[in-house]
């Protein structure tokens, strides 16, 4: 029995991470995931006014900044409700917030596909195609981000969502421009990503029909399947979702059984050798993200993949790209029903509470994002940000290895393990905020 330890710096992610691999008889036995650069956003927020979080928290991340904004404003609104002042959003404000969040998820997912998954897989398999994937990612991501900016004013780091609604008041011309940009994205997705019409792609509901998928996504699926990678990267087969969205309601999935969740049972703990905190639900580990949403929502194609491949690398990758199609289709519906004659914001601007506690939850690209705020005498006394990466990349506990660690265990090479690691789409800056 021969043991070997190797440290590997993981780049080409959002920030950096260090993986400390322990090999035993040629297979990975354990991995320590270490984040070394602390940023201190939670400390910066202490002593600030409640609404300062709407400007500061979007600076946590340059990729999921909009998700942080929505989580922050929901935390304030929840705090107001807990203090006795209920806030009722108009359908216009709700739909605009949902549309802009969808736009951010789409650009997240498509960048991950083209700038991480495809080039990294080709490099790992030594089958480089010479494709300029960055241009493809930029094309779709830039157009969907322009649609977002029509309502949010800018991206990244917009602060247009405020307690009670939004600050924008779009016109019919604005909506038409957004619709045109979404149409461009759908055409790109159809021609380049899947090689099918959006309707035909969304009609796929079982593994037996996956051969219909063409384009770059089809290439990715073939590379995974043809090289014996379909079943690797399995973890504990336990999933959790805290935010309600068009992709899934809140809930947890264990062996395909769905049950309710309550954010009050979420707890954090520090980790030796890392500035990132670990997160558990009732002291148990769960995976968050697109695969979790697909399992909790019982999305037919995700369930079919899971039946054949469990929580593998293939299931995880497919679930995320599949969300792009779902989100594009839903974004069209949101724009079509947008009620422009309604109020953008319903809260009296002079209405400010000085003492409250609130929780805001958003389904971000990588999974459930939770903001908790405590305000006393008008100032934030505590602010807690729990990011998706903290769920997936924890060290684990005394009885179980972390979610991503479990997925990497038994890999025979660092190259295989780090590719599995990247299927979770690591965000170091969010994790170390």
Image (cartoon, helix red, strand yellow):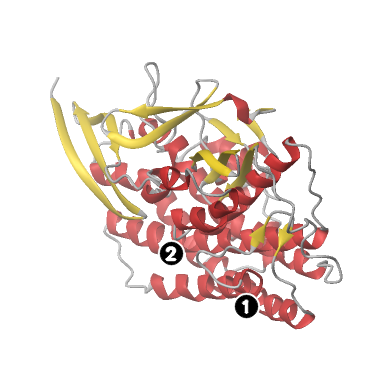
Examine the rendering and report whether any part of residue 306 can be seen. yes
| Vertical relation: 391 (above or below) 284 | below
**What's the residue at 75%, 57% (across, down)?**
94
Q: Quadrant of the N terminus?
A: top left
Circle 1 SS class:
helix
Say whether residue 39 is left or right of residue 46.
Answer: left
Q: Residue at x 84, y 68 (%)?
A: 339
Q: Position of residue 146 (x, y in %)?
A: 58, 75
Residue at 66% across, 64% down: 328
Furthest residue toward right: 341
Q: Which residue is mark 2?
A: 114
**Total numbered badges shown on the rendered structure:** 2
Q: Is residue 80 above or below residue 11?
A: above
Between 177 and 422, the one lying in front of the other is 177
Residue 254, visible in the rendered structure: no
Judging depth in this view, the residue of 294 and 158 nearest the camera is 158
Extreme residue in the bottom direction: 173
Neighbours of disc 2 within 10 Å: few (<14), some (14-19), many (20+): many
As rendered, which of 298 and 8 lies closer to the eye? 8
Residue occupying the far top of the picture: 399
Residue 250, by quadrant, is top right
Query: Residue 127 appears in which quarter of the rendering?
Result: bottom left
Where is residue 222 drawn, in percent x and y?
45, 56
Which badge, 2 or 1, comes first in the chain's sequence? 2
The residue indicated by pointer 1 is 184
Q: Position of residue 290 (x, y in %)?
A: 56, 46
Dot 2: element = helix
Q: From the viewer's perspective, is 386 left or right of 271?
A: right
Q: Choose between 4 and 251: the one closer to the eye.
A: 251
Q: Disc 2 to disc 1, how far (Cα)?
A: 18 Å
Q: Is residue 346 left or right of residue 312?
A: right
């Amino acid at each position: 029995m021969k043991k070997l330890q190797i440290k590997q710096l993981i780049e080409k992610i959002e920030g950096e991470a260090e993986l400390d691999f322990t090999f035993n008889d040629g297979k990975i036995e354990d991995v320590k995931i270490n984040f070394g650069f602390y940023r201190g956003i939670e400390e910066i927020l202490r002593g600030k006014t409640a609404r300062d979080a709407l400007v500061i928290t979007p600076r946590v991340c340059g990729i999921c900044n909009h998700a942080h904004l929505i989580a922050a404003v929901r935390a304030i609104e929840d705090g107001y409700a807990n203090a006795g002042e209920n806030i009722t959003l108009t359908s216009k404000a709700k739909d605009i917030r949902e549309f802009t969040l969808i736009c951010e998820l789409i650009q997240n997912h498509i960048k991950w596909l083209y700038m991480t998954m495809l080039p990294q897989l080709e490099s790992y398999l030594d089958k480089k195609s010479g494709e300029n994937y960055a241009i493809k990612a930029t094309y779709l991501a830039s157009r969907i981000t322009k649609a977002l900016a029509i309502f949010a004013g800018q991206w990244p780091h917009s602060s247009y969502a405020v307690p009670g609604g939004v600050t924008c008041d779009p016109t019919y011309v604005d909506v038409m421009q957004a619709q045109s940009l979404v149409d461009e994205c759908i055409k790109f997705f159809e021609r380049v990503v899947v090689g099918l019409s959006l309707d035909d792609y969304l009609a796929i509901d079982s593994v037996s029909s996956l051969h219909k998928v063409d384009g770059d996504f089809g290439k990715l699926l073939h590379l995974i399947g043809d090289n014996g990678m379909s079943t690797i990267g399995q973890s504990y087969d336990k999933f959790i979702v805290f935010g309600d969205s068009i992709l899934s309601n809140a809930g947890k999935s264990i062996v395909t059984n769905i049950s309710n969740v309550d954010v009050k049972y979420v707890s954090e703990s520090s980790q030796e050798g890392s500035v990132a905190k670990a997160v558990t639900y009732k002291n148990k580990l769960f995976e968050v993200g697109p695969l979790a949403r697909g399992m909790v929502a019982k999305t037919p194609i995700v369930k079919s993949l899971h039946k054949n491949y469990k929580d593998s690398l293939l299931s995880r990758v497919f679930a995320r790209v599949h969300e792009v199609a779902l989100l594009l289709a839903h974004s069209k519906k949101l724009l079509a029903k947008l009620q422009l004659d309604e109020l953008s914001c319903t809260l009296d601007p002079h209405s400010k509470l000085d003492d409250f506690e609130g929780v805001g939850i958003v389904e971000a690209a990588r999974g459930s994002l939770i903001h908790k705020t405590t305000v006393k005498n008008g100032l934030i006394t505590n602010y807690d940000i729990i990011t998706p990466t903290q769920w997936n990349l924890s060290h684990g506990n005394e009885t179980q290895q972390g979610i991503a660690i479990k997925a990497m265990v038994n890999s025979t090479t660092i190259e295989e393990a780090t590719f599995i690691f990247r299927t979770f789409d690591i965000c170091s800056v969010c994790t170390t905020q």
